Amino acid sequence: MNWPNDTCDHYWEHADWLPPWYILDRWCQRDDRCRQAKYEALLTACERGDVKYGRRDGKGFDDPVRELAERRILIIERISFDAWAIRLEGQSPLAAPPRPMAPLPPVPAWAKPMHSPTSSNAAVADADNRQTIDEASE
């Protein structure tokens, strides 16, 4: 499953939670024995609380980590995985996530949207009826 030129990688780089297969594809470029060893180490890190995990289906998880992995609903938190991988190997196999965007400045009180539900010139959504809301209510 190693796809070094995967066209979706730039989307995965924006994800805070990742499936184990994605992590393993980037972490192990060797043989299946290496991949299995790293998979077991990852699951053990989850069991010990070194790496945070969740369920893809969003439900609470009383199920053991290995059962979630077998059912393919285990997801791994990127930040805790990165921290654990750096402690283990000195670097993370994952690309650094993009920096968050700078917050937008607040909208000044005098700036109003051109079209809003309270605007007197808001158009009716029906394309065949080109009346405005004010004309329709008359």
Image: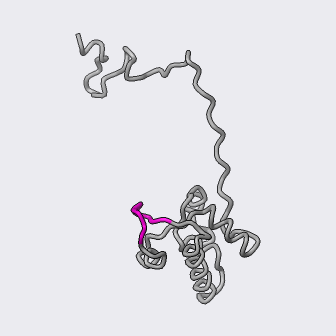
Give 116 or 83, whichever is nearer the viewer. 83
Residue 88 in the image: above or below residue 134 = below
Task: Out of 25 and 100, give the one closest to the viewer.
Answer: 100
* Residue 56 inside the magenta-drawn segment: yes
Residue reaching furthest to the left: 138
- Farthest residue to the bottom: give it: 33
Residue 41 point in image, percent of width and height: 61, 80
Residue at coordinates 60% horizontally, 83% vertically from top-left? 35
Q: Is residue 72 above or below residue 126?
A: below
Residue 104: give x, y in percent of width and height.
62, 34
Give me the residue at 30% from left, 17% from top. 133
Q: Nearer the viewer, residue 48 or 29?
A: 48
Q: Quadrant of the N terminus?
A: bottom right
How far across and down, in percent of the image, does residue 119 sit? 39, 17
The quarter holding residue 78 reads bottom right
Please say if 96 is above or below 51: above
- Which residue shows up at 45% across the image and 76% down it? 64
The magenta stretch is 54-62
- Chief secondary structure of the magenta portion: loop
Q: Is residue 67 left or right of residue 36?
A: left
Q: How many marks?
A: 0
Q: Is residue 134 magenta?
A: no
- In the figure, is residue 37 to the left or right of 134? right
Q: Position of residue 85 (x, y in %)?
A: 68, 71
